[in-house]
């Protein structure tokens, strides 16, 4: 009897010691956890160029990947100390909530509804819809497309909102929906469509791949903000990531961000203004 | 077609890795599921009622749940409890538990199909129960379970494609990654479909030939 009572006490003792240790680990926070682990665990996808995809050698590349590397560089001064966890788009929030990953950078659109479940970092890109035309074609820019009214056909990737999305910019245009991206571009190439409307980033990347063959209409709409997400309730970790991201867009590590932006979008972001910090203007 | 072959050549290693991953996970799950299923099947027939009950619950729970739900549960539930499984581990666990329940039912059915007179005959010549099980019942039961066991294997190989949902780099996800880069949607999905078909037909033929060889000895 006595020995079994001792066993219970010993068992409770072991459990409470374990609890104290886990609480200590939690109290130290995600930042310390990541630093002592020696690598950053990043959730992202692998099927969406130019954001996160595998290049021909099977390496994970893209703008999201480069953003994650900027954070790892800030942590370890080594952008290779990352473990990428491959996740589907609908696993982005669950994997954060269940601590599968430290951070997710996977073209996550910032919305108030999502902000109730996870903490958004500062944004690193603003997505929109843009129009692309064949270079030297009938319509050189957005004004020409708009002026042509109902004579213009726009090819777009098939989805429920596609028609409304195009009409928001070109109310009279004909909308041709296609079930895959390559068919949408083919419609433009074959002249079935006068312009293709899709995500600004996808268009930029495609234009970069096919240098000189296409032009941008110069008009974009449907803004949506992309940011990384972290778990709620750890302000130090969120603040660290925010500092790493903000300084890569505004401060010392801007050259890395600039190089990534040029590589994936074929454009050079304007240099941060020296003097008064523009973000507080 | 030439463009497809060129892209296929570029993507050969990732696709091969995915193919190996599909095979590895399927084999792991079927081995795990078969061991588990044999234990479960025997318990369902011979265990005392109180012990039979938890096995019954396990089998009904696994068979009544969609495989995708099992996979998501195996990925997220341990994480909530503080145990972090990798996606491949969680996926193999889910497929193995799923297979264990199905194979358990197969083994149960096959054991119950053996006339009870054989157990009595075994006892009357002085065999212990483990001896009866090993020498009389299981050799017959496993032989009758073979065709549906092959079916379960085929289901598992197909089911492993669902692991792409939790980010396991198996054949389907690797195919989607290639399509994400070159937009050759139909060509590469058809190619992946053919690979699944080849493996499943090969497994089916293997099963048929084993059935013939074992059947000849009946």
Image: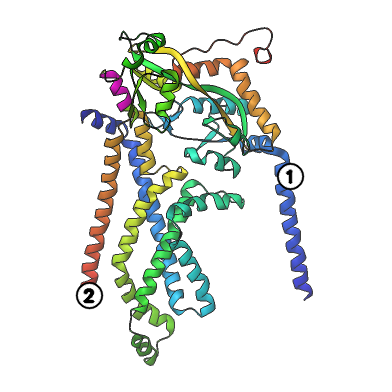
Q: Is residue A257 left or right of residue A14?
A: left
Camera-nearest residue between A60 and B135: A60
Q: Chain of mark 2?
A: B
In this figure, which residue is indicated by the disc labeled 1? A24
Q: Is residue A261 left or right of residue A209?
A: right
Answer above or below: position of B214 versus B206.
below
Q: Secondary structure at mark 2?
A: loop
Answer above or below: position of A216 versus B209.
above
Q: Which residues are magenta?
A: A183-190
Query: Crowding near pointer 2: few (<14 within 10 Å), some, many (20+)?
Result: few
Q: Secondary structure at mark 1?
A: helix
Query: In the rendered structure, are the residues bearing label 1 and label 2 in contact, judged by CB atoms less than 8 Å apart?
Result: no
Q: Is residue B198 left or right of residue A33?
A: left
- Classify the position of the N terminus of chain B by image quarter: top left
The rendered magenta stretch, by its main secondary structure, is classed as helix
User: Can you tell which quarter of the image residue A249 is in?
Assistant: top right
The image position of residue B108, as x and y in percent, is: 39, 73
Q: Residue furthest bottom?
A: B124
In this figure, which residue is indicated by the disc labeled 2? B217
Q: Is residue A65 magenta?
A: no
Q: Are marks 1 and 2 on the same chain?
A: no
Mark-to-mark CA distance, 1 and 2 = 65 Å
The image position of residue A189, as x and y in percent, is: 28, 18
Residue at (75%, 67%) from the top-left corner? Answer: A8
Answer above or below: position of B148 versus A41.
below
């Amino acid at each position: 009897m006595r020995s079994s009572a001792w066993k219970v006490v010993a068992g409770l003792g072991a459990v409470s010691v374990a609890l104290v240790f886990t609480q200590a680990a939690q109290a130290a926070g995600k930042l310390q956890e990541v630093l002592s682990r020696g690598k950053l665990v990043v959730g992202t996808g692998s099927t969406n160029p130019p954001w996160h995809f595998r290049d021909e050698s099977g390496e994970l590349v893209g703008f999201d990947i480069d953003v994650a590397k900027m954070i790892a560089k800030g942590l370890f001064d080594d952008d290779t100390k990352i473990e990428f966890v491959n996740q589907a788009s609908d696993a982005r929030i669950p994997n954060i909530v269940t601590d599968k990953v430290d951070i997710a950078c996977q073209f996550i659109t910032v919305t108030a509804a999502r902000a109730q479940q996870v903490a958004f970092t500062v944004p690193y890109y603003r997505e929109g819809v843009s129009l692309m035309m064949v270079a030297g074609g009938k319509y050189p820019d957005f004004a020409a497309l708009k002026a042509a009214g109902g004579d213009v056909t726009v090819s777009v990737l098939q989805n429920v909102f596609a028609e409304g999305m195009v009409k928001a910019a070109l109310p009279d245009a004909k909308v041709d929906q296609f079930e895959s991206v390559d068919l949408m571009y083919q419609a433009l190439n074959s002249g079935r469509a006068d312009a293709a409307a899709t995500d600004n980033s996808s268009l930029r990347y495609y234009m970069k791949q096919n240098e000189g063959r296409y032009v941008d209409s110069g008009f974009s709409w449907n803004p949506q903000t992309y940011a990384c997400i972290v778990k709620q309730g750890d302000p130090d970790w969120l603040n660290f990531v925010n500092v790493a991201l903000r300084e890569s867009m505004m401060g010392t590590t801007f050259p890395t961000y600039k190089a990534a932006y040029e590589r994936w979008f074929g454009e050079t972001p304007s240099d941060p203004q020296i003097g008064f910090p523009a973000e507080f203007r | 077609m030439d463009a497809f072959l060129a892209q296929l050549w570029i993507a050969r290693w990732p696709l091969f890795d995915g193919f190996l991953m599909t095979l590895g996970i399927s084999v792991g799950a079927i081995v795990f599921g078969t061991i588990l299923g044999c234990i479960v099947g025997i318990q369902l027939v011979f265990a005392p009622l109180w012990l039979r009950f938890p096995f019954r619950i396990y089998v009904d729970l696994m068979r009544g749940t969609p495989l995708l739900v099992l996979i998501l549960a195996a990925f997220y539930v341990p994480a909530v409890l503080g145990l972090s499984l990798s996606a491949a581990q969680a996926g193999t666990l889910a497929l193995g538990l799923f297979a264990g329940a199905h194979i358990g039912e197969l083994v149960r059915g096959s054991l119950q199909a053996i006339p009870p007179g054989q157990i009595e005959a075994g006892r009357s010549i002085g065999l212990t129960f483990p001896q009866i099980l090993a020498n009389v019942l299981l050799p017959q039961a496993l032989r009758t379970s073979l065709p549906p066991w092959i079916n379960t294997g085929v289901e598992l190989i197909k089911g492993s494609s669902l692991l792409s949902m939790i980010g396991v780099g198996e054949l389907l996800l690797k195919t989607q990654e290639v399509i994400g880069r070159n937009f050759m949607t139909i060509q590469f999905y058809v190619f992946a479909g053919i690979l699944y078909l080849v493996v499943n037909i090969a497994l089916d033929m293997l099963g048929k030939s084993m059935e013939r060889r074992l059947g000849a000895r009946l």
